[in-house]
Amino acid sequence: MSRRRFIVQGCSALGATALPCPWLGAADSSFDPWVEVHAENLRHNVRVVSRRAGARPILAVAKNNGYGLGVVNVGRAFEPLPEVAGLAVVKLAEAISLRDAGVKKPILLLGPLEASELQEALARGITPMVYTAMGDELERAAKGLGRPVAIQICVDTGIGRVGVAHREAAALIQDLASRRSVRVDGVLMTFAEDPEFDKEQLRRFLDLTDALTKKGLKLGRRHAASSFALFQHEDSFLDMVRPGMALYGIYSEAKFRTLGILDLRPAVALRCRVAYVKQLRAGDSAGYERAYRAKQDVWVATLPVGHADGLPRVAAKGARVRIGDAAYPIVASVSASHTIVEIGGEPRVRIGDVATLFDWKEGSRPEDLAAACGASVYDLAMHLNPLLPRRVV
Ligand SMILES: *Cc1c(COP(=O)(O)O)cnc(C)c1O
């Protein structure tokens, strides 16, 4: 068992109330910041997304280390849920670690592959996303495996990234779908998330795939809807929805929070313990470039968390940290591994107290931290350092 897996399992066994985690046998310090994963909130979000999608299957996007929660943690949480038809990741290593962790559901690999990597992906039952003329390559791989290979085909209907251009897609899809050793499990597209243009994109996608289906081609499930579309485009749910952020309980845009369409509950927290508490005298400064000046005598706490852990540098521009029952402002600057918090006239916190950068409580949700300092919630979740210990609670 890897050291990291030992920590995740060992600490989850302790439950949510046993803070701080003693990291028995591990080299992590109990002062390292850690990420908490709320398994029940993950399940709740899957249920509400499923309801919103009219019980269509969910392809759960778990790229970039499961949006910070740990790709194996989310893979294991989704594995037993019937609403989740499969998982999607960008990097081959993530797909392989899901398989190694015992995830049996279909895994769609959204990232590009070399021929040699294609072999390995297919051998592990990982479905590549295809958008180039690689039919011969797929047939060779199928021959090597002694069975047909499953693929999904990505069509670019206007976002301009990967995907075969919609004008040229019919020929490619016909070529791939007509090969006996290739099975097309799905065709997908991505919206530019421009409410008007999205409608045109969807029209292009439907025109293309309807015409091919009429010709008798089997295209598997058509899917397009990310978290944005769950709120914005009910007509794009098609055969399956493909959200990421919503499953982790985070509203991707502030305006979605008040719509009442989805009751999302954050499934991720970032916490650490107060490393040091000291009093500054009036006129003292703190932080690089003396970014903070004490106007009067004031107590400050140092948190052992910084931008190298994933806390955005801009958090010093208005974000607050909860310690005990109170929220305190981050001041000065966020450095690589240290953050300074202004406590006030009295030393109301102690070394070792748990500090919450964000969690699932109203007022300290990831969206609240992002809004307070102008950060993107995507940056917040996806920049959480993969080396931080993860605890499933
Ligand atoms: C990241 C991603 C998604 C999920 O996006 P969210 O905004 O997190 O819901 C869906 N599809 C593709 C192709 C993606 O890369």
Image (tube, grey):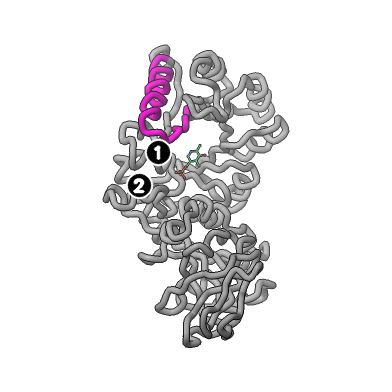
Q: Nearer the viewer, residue 295 or 47?
A: 295
- Above or below for 262 versus 216: below
Main SS, magenta region, reads helix
Q: Which amino acid does label 1 sit on?
A: Val
Can you give x and y, in whole percent of width and height, for residue 344 in the image?
A: 47, 81
Between disc 2 and disc 1, whose residue precedes? 2
- 280 lies left or right of 217: right
Q: In which quarter of the image is residue 107?
A: top right
Was residue 209 drawn as part of the magenta stretch in this picture?
yes
Q: Which amino acid does label 2 sit on?
A: Val
Instruction: Determine which of the numbered discs, if any, sits on residue 241 in the image.
Output: 1
Give the SS element for disc 1: strand
Residue at horizontal 41 percent and vertical 43 percent from the top: 227
Instruction: Determine which of the numbered discs, if any, sits on residue 49 in the image.
Output: 2
Residue at horizontal 63 percent and vertical 65 percent from the top: 335
Instruction: Determine which of the numbered discs, if any, sits on residue 159 in the image.
Output: none
Can you give x and y, in whole percent of width and height, for residue 318 in the image?
A: 47, 64
Q: Give the range drawn in magenta.
A: 186-211
